[in-house]
Each structure stands twice: as C-alpha cells, then as structure tokens.
Amino acid sequence: MEVWDLYNENYELTGESVTRGNPIPENRYHLVIHFWLINSKGEHLIQKRSPLVTSGSGKWAITGGSAQAGESSRDAVIREINEEIGYIVDNEDELIKFSSKLRGTFILDTWYLKKDIPIEVFQVGEEVSDVRYAGKNEIHSLIESGDFWEYHERYIDKMFELANS
C-alpha cells in the first residue's frame, strides 16, 4: 500500500495524506518525479514499461513515479532510479532539479543528470523490461507510433534543448 503526502499549491506539506488509488482532495496535490539521464551524445536513457505494470505496459518512457509519504523530491528520485533501473546515484549533487510545476492533481518535479553511464550498468526488473539510449528523432518516432508514454510534446522538446546546452 503506497501512501502519498499531500501538498497545497505553494508546494507546502499540509499534514494530510492519501493512499494510492483514492481520489486526491480538491486543492491538494501529491508529488511526482521524472528523471532524465542525458549522455554526452545528447541521447536520453529511456525504459520500456514491463508487461507486469498496469499503466503504460509495453510503452517506452523515462524513469519516474510518486514520492512516498515522508520522502523529499530528491529522496524520491534517488529511490525511483534504483527501483526502476537498478542504478545507485553515488553523488547526489550531480542530480539537478530542472523544474517544479503543478499538473492536474500533482506537483511534477523534473530532475536530470548529465553523465555517461554504460547501458550495461542498468538492471531491469519488475517495472521495466528494457533500457536504451535514444536521440531526439528516435524518441519522436516512438511518440508518433504510439510506443512512447504520452508526455506533452513541448516538455519532451525542452528536455532535448537541455541535452544540447
């Protein structure tokens, strides 16, 4: 059973919580993180959602998930990276928060890391069945074919701008 802390629109904890699957009360938000790994070629690490997951099964996506009760955004991204792709962040200072935005019933914190990590380092498991690096054209092709998670296109393009900065 996953429990989420609730925040107000100012990103302040309210002292309330909700169990995953229950409705989020009005004017309350839970914390979601996204993580983008960018290598020196400007490619992004993407992961294929396992057939075992209920949401987006078989689609390519990025690492992400909801913060659990008591976790900070940084704690959540470190946990999700380890859970989903088996990578342990050895230097937390390398993680950079790109943005924090209200999106529907959640606050989305987007994190990134620019680092060359060999694909062999990553381990797939219950939530993820495959990982690979992909460039802008390949990810856009996956989006057009319906094989990539439905992120807002402008969001994807901002991440490619970041890769080239």
Image: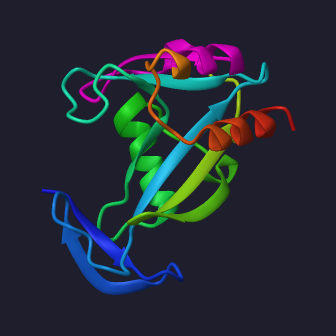
Q: Quadrant of the C terminus?
A: top right
Left-right relation of 76 to 126 = right
Res 118 visible = no
On the image, the x and y values in percent for residue 127 come to 28, 30
What residue is rendered at 43% in x and 57% in y?
Answer: 32
Viewer-closest of 123 and 127: 127
Residue positioned most to the left? 1
Left-right relation of 28 to 40 = left
Look at the image and say whether residue 132 sits in the magenta stretch.
yes
Viewer-closest of 164 and 157: 157
| Total numbered circles | 0
What residue is rendered at 20% in x and 67% in y?
Answer: 23
On the image, the x and y values in percent for residue 20 come to 19, 59
Q: Is residue 46 above or below residue 130?
A: below
Q: Quadrant of the N terminus?
A: bottom left
Look at the image and say whether residue 3 sits in the magenta stretch.
no
Q: Is residue 119 above or below residue 54?
A: above
Res 33 visible = yes
Residue positioned most to the bottom? 14
On the image, the x and y values in percent for residue 57 come to 28, 25
Left-right relation of 126 to 110 = left
What residue is rendered at 69% in x and 15% in y?
Answer: 137
On the image, the x and y values in percent for residue 129 come to 33, 17
Residue 76 quadrant: bottom left
What residue is rendered at 71% in x and 36% in y?
Answer: 157
Task: Report the magenta residues as a range.
Answer: 118-142
Colour scheme in the image?
rainbow
